[in-house]
Amino acid sequence: MLRRRIIPFLLIDKKGDCIKTTQFNNRKYIGDIFNNIRIFNEKKADEIVVLDIDASKNNTEPNFDTINKIASACRMPLTYGGGVNSLKVAKKIIGLGVEKICINSLALKTIDLIKIISD
């Protein structure tokens, strides 16, 4: 039998605040991202996924300073998604200490870039 894993997903907005949404609308502030990460560190989550829901929607680059701080605060593997639209951005995010990148909108637009990033 496979071991159950705890992998929380945290949605952040362009300011870096943790939010809860209903179909990415009706946003509710649920706390500071770093406080949420601290809680999941203490609970010994297996991995954490942070999605910036504004970066891709607004066609902006991710907030690299926030990603760096998140990666420094995490005591578990980190997946980041949002605003990843080029190999340059993907390399920069991995260079900040993120283990995995989540690509969604990009997959619909440029399949070739997914292979380039994975290589």
Image (tube, rainbow, N blue to C red):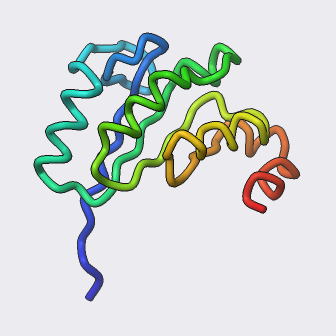
Q: Identify the residue at image location x=24%, y=71%.
A: 4
Q: Which quadrant is the C terminus positioned in?
A: bottom right
Q: Which quadrant is the N terminus positioned in?
A: bottom left
In the image, taking residue 47 as reference, residue 50 lies left or right, namely right
Q: Is residue 108 above or below residue 118?
A: above
Q: Identify the residue at image location x=25%, y=37%.
A: 37
Instruction: Give residue 72's quadrant in the image.
Output: top left
Instruction: Give residue 86's quadrant in the image.
Output: top right
In the image, taking residue 46 as reference, residue 16 lies left or right, namely right
Instruction: Give residue 50's quadrant in the image.
Output: top left
Q: Is residue 119 above or below residue 9?
A: below
Residue 8: x %, y % from top left: 29, 46
Q: How many marks?
A: 0
Q: Identify the residue at image location x=36%, y=23%.
A: 21
Residue 55: x %, y % from top left: 59, 21
Q: Nearer the viewer, residue 41 or 6?
A: 41
In the image, taking residue 1 as reference, residue 27 lies left or right, namely right
Residue at far right of view: 112
Residue 62: x %, y % from top left: 59, 24
Q: Nearer the viewer, residue 65 or 18?
A: 65
Residue at far bottom of view: 1
Q: Identify the residue at image location x=19%, y=28%.
A: 35
In the image, taking residue 22 as reference, residue 56 lies left or right, namely right
Residue 87: x %, y % from top left: 78, 42
